[in-house]
Amino acid sequence: MDKQEFPQDFMWGGAVAAHQLEGAYQAGGKGLSIADVMTLGSHGVPRKITDGVVDGEYYPNHNGIDFYHRYKEDIKLFAEMGFKCFRTSIAWTRVFPNGDEAEPNEAGLQFYDDLFDECLKYDIQPVVTLSHFEMPYHLVQQYGGWRDRKLIDFFTNFATVCFKRYQHKVKYWMTFNEINNQTNYEDGGSAYTDSGLLFKPGEDKEKGMYQAAHYELVASAKAVQIGHQINPDFEIGSMIAMCPIYPLTSKPADILFAQRAMQTRLWFSDVHANGFYPQWLLNHFDRKQFNLDMTTEDMAILKAGKVDYIGFSYYMSFAVQDTGKLEYHENQDRVANPYVEASEWGWQVDPIGLRYALNWFTDRYHLPLFIVENGLGAIDEKTADNQIHDDYRINYLHDHILQMKKAVLEDGVQLLGYTPWGCIDLVAASTGQMSKRYGFIYVDVDDYGQGTGNRYRKDSFYWYRDMIATNGAEIN
Ligand code: P53
C-alpha cells in the first residue's frame, strides 16, 4: 500500500441530513416533519414521539445547528478541507409542507437552489438523499405513513419536482435513507423514522413493516425511472445501513442463522439492485399468510427501476448465535462479539468489517458502491483555548479508510467516494443528542440547544484536510 493513492476522481466529502442540522423548522413555510415531534433521549433512553408539538417538551431538531442560516460559513469550512462532494438531504416538508399538496412551496425549493449553488461555487458536488427520516408528519396523521399506497404518488411527485428543479446541479441521488433499518421494527423507533409507522395495539408489526417497505421500494423504483427520463446522466442509488452480521462460532447452525439474519437485513438492496424479491422472503410471506398488497404492476415497476449504485452507511458489525428457529429478530437476537470493541453508545467498532462489506456488496450486485456514512459518535472536550483533541476519531477514520483502500486497490472494488457522517456536529438520530458528536467541526451547542453556535476546527479537521490533499497516500 506504500504511498499508493486513491483513484484521481475519488469523491472525498462529508454527510449530513437536513433535519439533523438545518433547524429553522418553520422557516419559509416549512411543515412539521416526523423528526419535529421527537424529543431528546440518550443512550438507553428512547426519544419520545409526541402527538404533535407539545408545550414543555424539548425537540432538538427544531434548532439543529441553525445550518439554515449559517450554511455559507459551514460550506466554506468544508471547502477548506478540500471536499469534492457534500451529501445532504432535501427536507420534504420544505418543498411539500404537508406532503399531499399538488404544488410545491417555492421558498423551500429556493433554499436548496442557494445551498447547492454555494457548494458548486467551491466545486463541491452535492450528493442528495430525497427521504432521510424526515417525511411530513401530516402524512403520518392523515394516512398512517407508508401503510397507505397513496404515499407512492406523494413521494414520486416530490422526487419529480426535485429532479427537474436541480437536474443541472445534482448528479448523484439516493431515494430512501437506510430503508432497511426497519428490520428492527419491534423497537418502534426505526419503523417510525423509516416509514412513519406508529403501531396500533394488537397490530401485526411485522406485516405492517413489510407492507410499508414494499410501497417504498415501488416508489423508489418509480423515482429511478422518472429521474433517468429527466436526466439520463443521473446516478440514482439505494441507501442501505450495512451492519454485517457474523456467526459467533463456526457451528453450522450459527452460520445458517447468520446467513438468514443477513438476508433479513439486506433483502431491501436485493430488490433495489436485482429488481425482484428473493424467494426465501416470498415463501416467508406465504407461510405467515401476510397477503400483502403487491400487484403484478408493482413487480414490473421494480424490474424497470433498478438502482445505478449502492450507497451505504457503515458504523459497526453485529454477531448472532443459533436461536433454534430460522427467523431473525434484530432487537433480541444480537450477541456481543468478543473480538471487537464497542463505542460509548454500544456500537461495535470493526474496521475490517468495512472491507468485508465492500466485497460482499460487489460480489452480490456487481454495481459501483458509495460509502455515504461512516464515523464515530463520541463526547468531545473543547479546551480553554478552543482546541478539540479528537485523536480517537482520527484513529477510527484512519483504520476504516485503510480497509477501504485495501478493498479498492487490492480487491478491485469499484468505489465512487467516501462521505463520513456528521462532518459538522449535529443532532444524533437515535438519541437526539448534540453531545454524541461526529464532526470535523465542533459546534458550540449542547443537548438542550444552549451555546454560542460558534464553529471550531477539531484536530480531525486538519487530519482529514491533509488526507484529502494527499488522496490517501499516507494511509498505510
Ligand atoms: P446516530 C442505526 C444504525 C446505524 C445507523 O446515528 C443509523 C441508525 C439510526 O440511528 O443511522 C444513521 O446519529 C443515519 C443518520 C444518523 C447516523 O447513522 O444515532 O443515517 O441519520 O445520524 C448516526 O448516532
Image (spheres, rainbow, N blue to C red):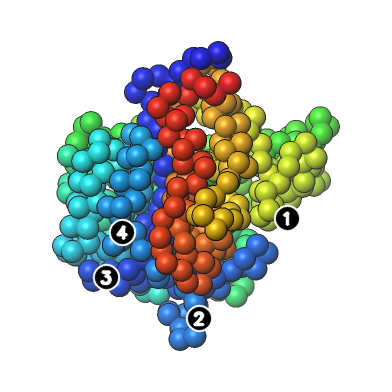
Q: Is residue 251 above or below residue 157?
A: above
- Residues tagged 1 and 4 counted as in contact (Cβ below 8 A): no
Within 10 Å of disc 1 (Cα), the crowding (few <14, some 14-19, many 20+) is few
Distance of mark 2 from mark 3, alpha carbons?
Answer: 20 Å
Q: Indicate the quadrant where residue 471 lies.
A: top left
Q: Of the residues tagged 3 and 4, which is closer to the observer?
A: 4
- Of the 4 image quadrants, the one containing the N terminus is top right
Disc nearer the start of the sequence (3/4): 3
Residue 46: % across, % down: 61, 67
- Residue 70 is tagged as 4
Residue 9: % across, % down: 34, 23
Q: Secondary structure at mark 3?
A: helix
Q: Secondary structure at mark 4?
A: helix
Q: Is residue 307 left or right of residue 394?
A: left
Compare residues 396 and 335 and report the one nearer the observer: 396
What residue would you read off at disc 1? 332
What residue would you read off at disc 3? 27
Distance of mark 3 from mark 4, alpha carbons?
Answer: 14 Å
Q: Disc 3 marks which amino acid? A: Ala
* Residue at point 34%, 59% (across, down): 67
Distance of mark 1 from mark 3, alpha carbons?
Answer: 41 Å
Distance of mark 2 from mark 1, alpha carbons?
Answer: 30 Å
Q: Is residue 359 visible?
A: no
Q: Secondary structure at mark 1?
A: helix
Within 10 Å of disc 2 (Cα), the crowding (few <14, some 14-19, many 20+) is few
Q: Is mark 3 within 8 Å of ligand 1?
A: no
Q: Of the residues tagged 1 and 4, which is closer to the observer?
A: 4
Q: Is residue 230 left or right of residue 124?
A: left
Residue 146: % across, % down: 42, 61
* Residue at point 54%, 24% (across, down): 475
Q: Disc 2 marks which amino acid? A: Glu
